[in-house]
Protein backbone atom coordinates (compact mmCIF):
# COMPACT_ATOMS: atom_id res chain seq x y z
CA UNK A 1 0.00 0.00 0.00
CA UNK A 2 1.47 3.30 -1.03
CA UNK A 3 1.49 6.13 1.38
CA UNK A 4 0.38 9.49 0.01
CA UNK A 5 3.16 11.93 -0.53
CA UNK A 6 3.03 14.68 1.99
CA UNK A 7 4.00 18.20 1.23
CA UNK A 8 7.11 19.09 3.11
CA UNK A 9 7.68 22.74 3.79
CA UNK A 10 10.93 23.73 5.26
CA UNK A 11 11.26 26.42 7.82
CA UNK A 12 11.72 29.95 6.52
CA UNK A 13 15.15 30.57 5.11
CA UNK A 14 17.79 31.98 7.35
CA UNK A 15 18.15 35.74 7.59
CA UNK A 16 21.34 35.59 5.52
CA UNK A 17 19.41 34.31 2.50
CA UNK A 18 17.74 36.93 0.39
CA UNK A 19 15.75 34.43 -1.72
CA UNK A 20 12.00 34.97 -1.31
CA UNK A 21 9.72 31.92 -1.06
CA UNK A 22 7.10 31.92 -3.79
CA UNK A 23 3.53 31.89 -2.50
CA UNK A 24 2.62 28.79 -4.50
CA UNK A 25 5.11 26.64 -2.61
CA UNK A 26 4.04 27.74 0.84
CA UNK A 27 2.02 25.23 2.84
CA UNK A 28 -1.74 25.67 2.66
CA UNK A 29 -4.12 23.64 4.72
CA UNK A 30 -5.86 21.13 2.49
CA UNK A 31 -9.47 20.23 3.23
CA UNK A 32 -8.58 16.66 4.21
CA UNK A 33 -5.93 17.93 6.63
CA UNK A 34 -8.14 20.40 8.42
CA UNK A 35 -9.03 19.34 11.92
CA UNK A 36 -12.48 17.83 12.23
CA UNK A 37 -15.03 19.39 14.42
CA UNK A 38 -15.62 16.98 17.26
CA UNK A 39 -19.30 16.73 17.98
CA UNK A 40 -20.59 16.29 21.45
CA UNK A 41 -23.08 13.55 22.37
CA UNK A 42 -25.72 16.24 22.79
CA UNK A 43 -25.25 17.60 19.29
CA UNK A 44 -25.29 14.07 17.87
CA UNK A 45 -28.53 13.36 19.69
CA UNK A 46 -30.05 16.59 18.36
CA UNK A 47 -28.98 15.66 14.85
CA UNK A 48 -30.51 12.20 15.29
CA UNK A 49 -33.79 13.71 16.44
CA UNK A 50 -33.76 16.08 13.48
CA UNK A 51 -33.23 13.17 11.11
CA UNK A 52 -36.07 11.28 12.77
CA UNK A 53 -38.40 14.27 12.36
CA UNK A 54 -37.53 14.74 8.69
CA UNK A 55 -39.52 12.68 6.19
CA UNK A 56 -37.61 9.51 5.33
CA UNK A 57 -36.11 9.25 1.88
CA UNK A 58 -36.05 6.13 -0.23
CA UNK A 59 -32.65 5.05 1.10
CA UNK A 60 -33.77 5.48 4.70
CA UNK A 61 -36.92 3.46 4.03
CA UNK A 62 -34.89 0.65 2.44
CA UNK A 63 -32.48 0.69 5.40
CA UNK A 64 -35.38 0.50 7.84
CA UNK A 65 -36.92 -2.38 5.89
CA UNK A 66 -33.58 -4.18 5.85
CA UNK A 67 -33.23 -3.76 9.61
CA UNK A 68 -36.75 -5.13 10.08
CA UNK A 69 -36.00 -8.06 7.78
CA UNK A 70 -32.96 -8.96 9.86
CA UNK A 71 -34.89 -9.00 13.13
CA UNK A 72 -36.55 -12.26 14.11
CA UNK A 73 -39.86 -10.85 15.30
CA UNK A 74 -40.50 -8.49 12.39
CA UNK A 75 -43.82 -7.94 10.67
CA UNK A 76 -43.67 -8.84 6.98
CA UNK A 77 -46.53 -6.47 6.18
CA UNK A 78 -44.53 -3.59 7.65
CA UNK A 79 -41.50 -4.50 5.53
CA UNK A 80 -43.67 -4.68 2.43
CA UNK A 81 -45.30 -1.35 3.26
CA UNK A 82 -41.89 0.32 3.47
CA UNK A 83 -40.58 -0.96 0.15
CA UNK A 84 -43.66 -1.36 -2.09
CA UNK A 85 -43.69 2.26 -3.21
CA UNK A 86 -39.96 2.27 -3.91
CA UNK A 87 -40.11 -0.97 -5.91
CA UNK A 88 -42.89 0.50 -8.09
CA UNK A 89 -41.32 3.94 -8.49
CA UNK A 90 -39.96 4.40 -12.02
CA UNK A 91 -37.68 7.33 -11.18
CA UNK A 92 -36.11 5.72 -8.09
CA UNK A 93 -32.44 4.79 -8.02
CA UNK A 94 -31.85 1.48 -9.81
CA UNK A 95 -29.94 -0.07 -6.89
CA UNK A 96 -32.57 1.06 -4.37
CA UNK A 97 -35.33 -0.37 -6.56
CA UNK A 98 -33.44 -3.67 -6.81
CA UNK A 99 -32.94 -3.81 -3.04
CA UNK A 100 -36.58 -2.86 -2.46
CA UNK A 101 -37.73 -5.59 -4.84
CA UNK A 102 -35.47 -8.07 -3.06
CA UNK A 103 -36.84 -7.10 0.35
CA UNK A 104 -40.38 -7.27 -1.02
CA UNK A 105 -39.77 -10.80 -2.33
CA UNK A 106 -38.08 -11.75 0.95
CA UNK A 107 -41.08 -10.53 2.96
CA UNK A 108 -43.50 -12.42 0.69
CA UNK A 109 -41.42 -15.59 0.99
CA UNK A 110 -41.22 -15.28 4.77
CA UNK A 111 -44.98 -14.78 4.95
CA UNK A 112 -45.53 -17.85 2.74
CA UNK A 113 -43.14 -19.92 4.88
CA UNK A 114 -44.85 -18.82 8.11
CA UNK A 115 -48.24 -19.73 6.68
CA UNK A 116 -47.04 -23.12 5.49
CA UNK A 117 -45.37 -23.76 8.86
CA UNK A 118 -48.63 -22.91 10.64
CA UNK A 119 -50.52 -25.23 8.29
CA UNK A 120 -48.00 -28.03 8.83
CA UNK A 121 -48.16 -27.49 12.59
CA UNK A 122 -51.95 -27.76 12.51
CA UNK A 123 -51.73 -30.92 10.40
CA UNK A 124 -49.20 -32.40 12.84
CA UNK A 125 -51.47 -31.59 15.78
CA UNK A 126 -54.39 -33.30 14.02
CA UNK A 127 -52.25 -36.35 13.20
CA UNK A 128 -51.10 -36.62 16.83
CA UNK A 129 -54.70 -36.48 18.03
CA UNK A 130 -55.68 -39.17 15.51
CA UNK A 131 -52.73 -41.36 16.57
CA UNK A 132 -53.68 -40.93 20.24
CA UNK A 133 -57.29 -41.87 19.46
CA UNK A 134 -56.13 -44.96 17.55
CA UNK A 135 -53.88 -45.95 20.45
CA UNK A 136 -56.78 -45.61 22.89
CA UNK A 137 -58.99 -47.74 20.61
CA UNK A 138 -56.23 -50.34 20.28
CA UNK A 139 -55.82 -50.43 24.07
CA UNK A 140 -59.59 -50.82 24.55
CA UNK A 141 -59.72 -53.61 21.98
CA UNK A 142 -56.73 -55.33 23.63
CA UNK A 143 -58.49 -55.18 27.02
CA UNK A 144 -61.63 -56.72 25.46
CA UNK A 145 -59.56 -59.43 23.81
CA UNK A 146 -57.79 -60.18 27.11
CA UNK A 147 -61.15 -60.34 28.88
CA UNK A 148 -62.51 -62.74 26.25
CA UNK A 149 -59.36 -64.89 26.49
CA UNK A 150 -59.73 -65.04 30.30
CA UNK A 151 -63.41 -65.93 29.94
CA UNK A 152 -62.59 -68.66 27.43
CA UNK A 153 -59.93 -70.10 29.77
CA UNK A 154 -62.30 -70.04 32.76
CA UNK A 155 -65.00 -71.79 30.68
CA UNK A 156 -62.47 -74.38 29.53
CA UNK A 157 -61.31 -74.90 33.16
CA UNK A 158 -64.93 -75.28 34.33
CA UNK A 159 -65.67 -77.78 31.58
CA UNK A 160 -62.55 -79.79 32.48
CA UNK A 161 -63.46 -79.73 36.19
CA UNK A 162 -67.04 -80.81 35.47
CA UNK A 163 -66.02 -83.96 33.61
Image (cartoon, rainbow, N blue to C red):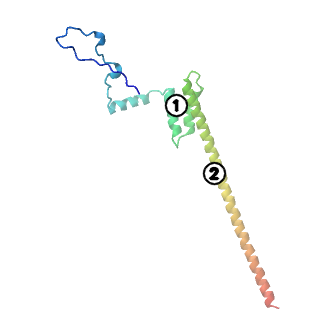
**Residue beneath label 2, please?**
121
Residue placed at 60% from the left, 26% from the top?
Answer: 88
> Pointer 1: residues within 10 angstroms few (<14), some, or many (20+)?
many
Residue placed at 33% from the left, 21% from the top?
Answer: 6
Kind of element beneath mark 2 = helix
In terms of depth relative to the viewer, which is nearer, 70 or 135?
70
Q: Is residue 147 left or right of residue 37?
A: right
Q: Classify the position of the N terminus by image quarter.
A: top left
Relative to residue 92, is residue 16 depicted above or below? above
Residue placed at 59% from the left, 40% from the top?
Answer: 110
Residue placed at 54% from the left, 27% from the top?
Answer: 96
In terms of depth relative to the viewer, which is nearer, 40 or 140?
40
> Pointer 2: residues within 10 angstroms few (<14), some, or many (20+)?
few
Measuring from the top left, give residue 145's x and y in whole percent: 75, 73
Measuring from the top left, give residue 112's x and y in whole percent: 63, 41
Relative to residue 154, is residue 36 depicted above or below? above
Q: Is residue 149 left or right of residue 7?
A: right
Kind of element beneath mark 1 = helix
Q: Quadrant of residue 128?
A: bottom right
Which numbered tag is attached to residue 62? 1
From this viewpoint, which residue is outermost toward the bottom?
Answer: 163
Residue 155 in sight: yes
Amino acid sequence: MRRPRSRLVSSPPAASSNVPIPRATQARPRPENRPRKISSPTSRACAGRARARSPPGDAARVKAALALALSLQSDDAEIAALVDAIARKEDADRDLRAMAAFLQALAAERRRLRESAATAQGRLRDERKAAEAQKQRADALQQKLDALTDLEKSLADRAAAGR
